[in-house]
Amino acid sequence: MSKELLEFSVMVDEQFDMKFNWLEGAFGFILKVFGK
């Protein structure tokens, strides 16, 4: 049970990291566009 829960939390963490990196990249791109 705890092993399945751990695998699930790792999967969620990876998805969250991907979304966060995408948001960070998009935000940086917007700053570049408005910065120039």
Image: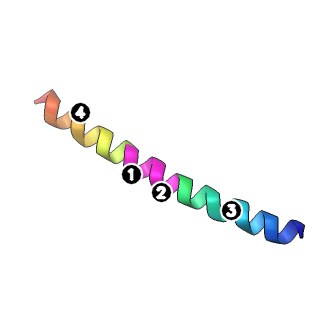
Q: CA distance from mark 2 to mark 1?
A: 6 Å
Amino acid at the residue labelled 1: Trp
Q: CA distance from mark 1 to mark 3?
A: 18 Å
Label at residue 18: 2
Residue contact between numbered discs 2 and 1, judged by CB atoms under 8 Å:
yes
Residue contact between numbered discs 4 and 2, judged by CB atoms under 8 Å:
no
Residue denoted by label 4: 31
Measuring from the top left, give residue 18's x and y in whole percent. 48, 57
Measuring from the top left, give residue 26's x and y in whole percent. 30, 45
Residue found at the far left of this picture:
36
Q: CA distance from mark 4 to mark 2?
A: 20 Å
Amino acid at the residue labelled 2: Met
Q: How many other residues sit within 10 Å of disc 2, few (<14), some (14-19) or many (≥20)?
A: few
SS of the residue at dot 3?
Answer: helix
Q: Residue at x 47, y 47 (%)?
A: 20
Q: Earlier in the sequence, mark 4 or mark 2?
A: 2
Residue denoted by label 3: 10
SS of the residue at dot 4?
Answer: helix
Amino acid at the residue labelled 4: Leu
Residue 18 versus residue 1 in the image, above or below: above
* Left or right: where 16 falls relative to 2: left
SS of the residue at dot 2?
Answer: helix
Residue 18 within the magenta-colored segment of the rendering: yes
SS of the residue at dot 1?
Answer: helix
Q: How many other residues sit within 10 Å of disc 3, few (<14), some (14-19) or many (≥20)?
A: few
Residue 15 versus residue 36 in the image, above or below: below
Instruction: Locate the C terminus by quadrant.
Output: top left
